[in-house]
Image: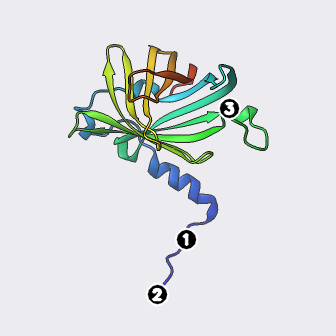
Amino acid sequence: METPTQEPATDVPATFYAALQAAGPHPDQALAPDLYGWLIGSWDAEVVDHLPDGGERRQSAEMHFAWVLEGRAIQDLWIVPARRDRRGTPEPGNRYGTTFRMWDAAIGAWRIRWVNPVNGSESTLVARRVGADIVQTGADASGRLLRWIFEAIQPSSFHWRGDISEDGGRTWTCQVEFFARRRVQL
């Protein structure tokens, strides 16, 4: 069997990113509510992890959002601490993960898939607009309910909150908050 010719290693990243990125939503996304288009660009944030003992861990963060896959999805990167503040061995609260956000006409909502290879976490959620907020709901690998909310949405800022329920949604605990400011709009 003949081995296909590989592109030179220096061209792989440029070719990959050119094939991945999209200038905007694909025309077949016209009926999808635009929950996430406002996020396109780069953001800086302060992260507050609410620890089980009642304490807090504060770190820097950066997030980047772009249309991908011919404009049929939005992909993001959430990096905590921000790259400028990362030092050697990963510390608690370390995140370097990505989310795919895809419209699903069959359920009339956006499907969300978060993956963080740093700690092996994965989450699958469904997102809808609730009033002025974007509410994403699902469960973690242990079956605990998740509620991730974009709120206080402004052109140059937003607040993101990650809640978890240990009792099937009767009560919720805020695990993490991101206070974000826009850096660059793509």
| First along the sequence among labels 1 and 3 | 1
Q: Which residue lies under the disc numbered 3?
A: 82
What amino acid is at disc 1? Answer: Gln
- Which residue is located at x 50 percent, y 17 percent? 158
Of the two numbered discs 3 and 2 in the rendering, the one whose residue sits closer to the viewer: 3
- Which residue is located at x 66 percent, y 34 percent? 93
Residue 9 occupies quadrant: bottom right
Q: Which residue lies under the disc numbered 2?
A: 1
User: Percent from the top left, x then y, of residue 41?
Assistant: 51, 29
Which residue is outermost to the bottom?
1
Q: Measured along the vertical axis of the image, is residue 66 above or below residue 19?
A: above
Of the two numbered discs 1 and 3 in the rendering, the one whose residue sits closer to the viewer: 3
Of the two numbered discs 2 and 1 in the rendering, the one whose residue sits closer to the viewer: 2
| First along the sequence among labels 3 and 2 | 2
What amino acid is at disc 3? Answer: Ala
- Which residue is located at x 75 percent, y 32 percent? 85
Give the CA separation, mark 2 to mark 1.
Answer: 15 Å
User: Percent from the top left, x then y, of residue 63?
Assistant: 57, 31
**Which label was assigned to residue 6?**
1
What amino acid is at disc 2? Answer: Met
Query: Label 3: few (<14), some or many (≥20) within 10 Å?
Result: some
Give the CA separation, mark 3 to mark 2.
Answer: 45 Å
User: Percent from the top left, x then y, of residue 64?
Assistant: 54, 33
Residue 23 occupies quadrant: top left
Q: Is residue 182 visible?
A: no
